[in-house]
Amino acid sequence: RFRQNASSKNLPPMVPYSVPFVGSAVQFGLNPIEFLENAYEKYGPVFSMKMMGSVFTYVVGSDASALFFNSKNEDLNAEEIYGKLVTPVFGKGVAYDVPNSIFLEQKKMFKTGLNVSDFKRHVPLLIAETVKYFERWGDEGERNLFEAMAELIVLTASRCLQGEEIREVLNEEVAQLYSDLDGGFSHEAWLLPAWLPLPSFRRRDAAQKRIKEIFFNAIQKRRTSGRHAEDILQTLIEATYKDGRHLTDDEISGMLIGLLMAGQHTSSTTGSWLGFFLAKDQALQAALVDEQKHICGEPYREVTFEAIRDMSLLDRCVKETLRLRPPIMTMMRMVKTEQEVKGYVIPPGHQICVSPPVNQRVKDTWESPNTFDPDRYLNPDTTSDTKFSYVPFGAGRHRCIGEQFAYVQIKTIWAVLLQKYEFDLVDGYFPETNFATMIHTPKNPIIRYKLRQN
Ligand code: HEM
């Protein structure tokens, strides 16, 4: 008989702020992870903060995050948050521009094109692209690792995920178009109205249009050639929705752009951070080379998918890199229906968030949380297997479909690099984190290298 109104309910504690509207944006922007860790310590696993007029409610740790990952899209909605950023880049008809049930079907189609037999085909392609790319590094020197990873991953992802016709047209023009499209993933695109005539918005939209034309041609080439290739392009051409409808060329090209973009920064930052963790630790590099020799035999040039899969130390190094430097620092949903968690009520209109780097370093779950220790996964007692305390790829209905491909890609690139070079930090500098970009990249990412002697 008695209905409380939202204001009298137990809302999560609000991190105090002094500037109206702007809220905590400035403090948060300086170091979001530290900000969230402090708030967690002070307020516990559920708290809200204000930024640019919106309320963001974080659920921290495995227990509280369960609400987020187990939710239905009608209750906690993704497209309302991500659509504005993603749709102008991928184009219409895919991902967050369609009802989630359709996007789930599209994700299923991708999955069919990303299985073990595909990875077996990918490994030699990845090796060839990596060997060729790093010829330009010569025998020794100091170079920007992040730049190299970003360029290499466009090439490898395009070759493996988009098919030959598209990799063939990946020239400087297309690389520039990707970079313009990528400029669409910015804080300004996130925060400012879409109709503003900003140069970066215009470049993004022009690139979207031009890339679609190029992709249409490539798809047409495949359709008319009658060639049957074993790749994702073929999978998408043949795929049907549950109602029997085939994908249009527009949807296929949107999905191909999406595949490339989803894996681009995520994999290139992970590949770079991994490089710096390895450069810091010569003994770990030596152990990884030993592992490779042991698995591949000597001489150990021949690296296959099976060999990559069996490199378990390398695997744990990637896993630990993704714990300490997960590229996606916050996942978000719009709250559509009232939610209850840990005694608090989260009302519609809040944006609910989970932060992988925070969950993955919660002190009461992780031992020595700030130490890079790939061997922590050997001993299940010292790590938490609580379900949502390790979520670099998310969980639930929005979970990543690219995890296995990303592992194969990053591991293969580093297996090749470790065969060729020994790495070192430049004068002991381990890169700080650049929090200004949406994905937290390494600052001044220069690495030192010389040909491996043994
Ligand atoms: C979703 C991380 C690579 C395609 C996600 C999510 C995360 C993530 C955290 C969940 C987002 C959310 O719940 O809001 C990563 C990381 C990667 C990576 C850390 C590499 C190290 C890739 C690659 C692809 C890909 C290579 C494509 C081949 C996708 C797709 C989704 C997704 C399609 C689904 C989004 C949704 O359903 O809303 N990824 N990803 N990702 N990722 Fe990845």
Image: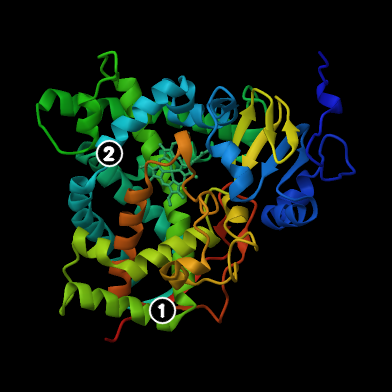
> Could you tell me if the residues under marks 2 and 1 are in contact, i.e. CB atoms within 8 Å?
no
How many numbered marks does the figure carry?
Answer: 2
Specify how the rendered protein is coloured. Answer: rainbow
Mark 2–mark 1 distance (CA, rounded to whole Å): 34 Å
| For residue 319, side relative to residue 186 (left or right) | left
Which residue occupies the foreground of this view, 339 or 333? 339
- Residue highlighted by disc 1: 284
Which residue occupies the foreground of this view, 204 or 331? 331
Q: Position of residue 386 (x, y in %)?
A: 52, 54
**Quadrant of the rendering where the C terminus is positioned:** bottom left
Which residue occupies the foreground of this view, 355 or 147? 355
- Figure check: 221 above or below 281: above
Q: Quadrant of residue 430?
A: bottom right
Badge number at residue 162: 2
Q: Quadrant of residue 410?
A: bottom left
**Ligand 1 falls in which quarter?**
top left
Q: Is residue 450 visible?
A: no
Which residue occupies the foreground of this view, 304 or 361? 361
Q: Quadrant of residue 238?
A: top left
Few, some or many residues within 10 Å of mark 1 (<14, 14–19, 20+): some
Q: Secondary structure at mark 2?
A: helix
Q: Position of residue 66 (x, y in %)?
A: 57, 41
Q: Secondary structure at mark 1?
A: helix
Q: In the image, which is nearer the foreground, mark 2 or mark 1?
A: 1
User: What's the residue type where badge 1 is placed?
Assistant: Leu
